[in-house]
Image: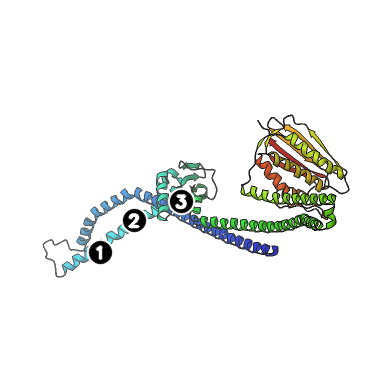
Amino acid sequence: MKKSTIWLLTIVMAATIMGLLFVQIMYMEDMVRMRNEQFSETVQRSLYAVSDALEQDETRFYLDQDLNEAERYQFELGDRLPSEITGSINSQGLGENKTAKPEIGSGNFKFSGQYENQQAILKGQYLYQKGLLNEVILSILTQASDRPIVERADSARVNSYIKKELESNGLEVPYEFALVSPRQGVVYHSAGYDPNDEGPKQYSTVLFPKDPESKRNVLKVLFPTKSDYIYASIKFMIPSFVFTFILMFIFIYTIVVIFRQKKLSEIKNDFINNMTHEFKTPISTISLAGQMLNDETVLKSPTMMKHVSQVITDETKRLRFQVEKVLQMSLFERGNATIRLKDSDAHAIIDNVVSTYRIKAEKFGGHITADFSAEDSIVNVDEMHFTNVIFNLLDNAIKYRREEVAPELSITTRNIGDEKFEIRISDNGIGMKKEDLKKIFEKFYRVHTGNRHDVKGFGLGLAYVSKMIELFKGSIKAESELNKGTTFIITLPLFK
């Protein structure tokens, strides 16, 4: 798959997932907003009902004050009505002749008189009640605001009204309340009320709104768990977000794996090409030596025979070494390789490798210096693999030298405390960029060397070195600057 196709798929998938997240977030915000508005509307409706109930209580209070007077008036009116009716009848001449018999139609007269009397009673009661109500209304308008607020709206009654109205509106959440007076401040409040919390969790309403503005008392109600109540309605969105993020993680991981696999494929292609060139040279040399053995003149010359056989032996060793390097890395990756750790003198091993490479450095006009400053150099390593580690690092220093400068290599050792042994291998070669330093220990990775075509390899050398140091329970890192050189720093635990 082409890289452009991968990037196109990545952009489309990323846009799709981001769009899905955007829609979910917008839906959640709408749900929260609607729930919040519904909550606020319910609370305000409940508080208005509480204020209305308190006003009705106050009206009943003033009506109860005049209840005794109304009852007394009714009793007085009842005692007075019979004599008035009798006097009225006598004044019309009906009571002068007590022995006279009632005329025809006198029953109707009696009924009509009683009906009129009843009307007069009801009319009197109505006129009195009307006057009484006028007096109550006048008292409310002129005297009510002067009553102490704790009498007009005591805390127990207010609390019961708030609870009743909230429950009747389907809102069963914990609340705290307080009554605030413009003159006294907080008159009373519930135990958990926080006067400093003036945020969206608090609602208020004016009690007795017909009072003068300077005497208006405010009921404040605080809902500490409002946020929990609001967001409880969108809990079903949590699994949706979880699944979306899982999908996003899988998508990102898939894209990373695709790019890694593509890069690995390119590296393997380079590896196959390099391996082909590496194998081609010794195979061609061996093939040429075999053809020379068919020449009778070569067979007759012992010197030529010895030279040809030596060439075949050297090239066979070279070929076997390359094959062994590939096989070793394969075994280490599968965990089937075995190493034989024992306490070894690191100075002695390093000195043997330096002696071998000193001649090679001098061939290019350079030299190697060794400074063994470490007092304790006994480490627990596999001697063969440790030798190969130093061999690989020195071989890289020679291969990646600068053409215009003689190679200068140095190996120094020192102890770090009583438990660490450090080896520094430095050169003045072509160096590396910072981005290459992070990848040089990866398998098959090779740093680009520009127009240098004489540097061959599989990209396995430093991967092998890193793997060995890891098995020796040590660490390795590289410091480099382009066109100035590279330093490899190996740290190993001292053998105790």
Cα distance, mark 3 to mark 2? 25 Å
Under circle 2, the secondary element is helix
Q: Amino acid at mark 1?
A: Glu
Q: Which image quarter is the C terminus in?
A: top right
User: Any mark on residue 208, and which?
Assistant: 3
* Closer to the eye: label 2 or 1: 2
Q: Examine the rendered structure and indicate whether residue 187 appears above or below residue 212.
A: above
In this view, the residue farthest toward the front is 300
> x%, y% of residue 167?
41, 53
Q: Nearer the viewer, residue 260 or 395?
A: 395
User: Any mark on residue 129, and which?
Assistant: 2
Q: Amino acid at mark 3?
A: Phe
- Classify residue 466 by image quadrant: top right
> x%, y% of residue 55?
42, 52
Q: Are marks 2 and 1 in contact (CB under 8 Å)?
A: no
* Closer to the eye: label 1 or 3: 3
Cα distance, mark 2 to mark 1? 20 Å
Tell me which numbered mark, 1 or 3, is placed earlier along the sequence.
Answer: 1
Under circle 1, the secondary element is helix
User: Any mark on residue 116, and which?
Assistant: 1
Point 19% across, 67% down: residue? 109
Cα distance, mark 1 to mark 3? 44 Å
> x%, y% of residue 400?
81, 48
Q: Amino acid at mark 2?
A: Gln
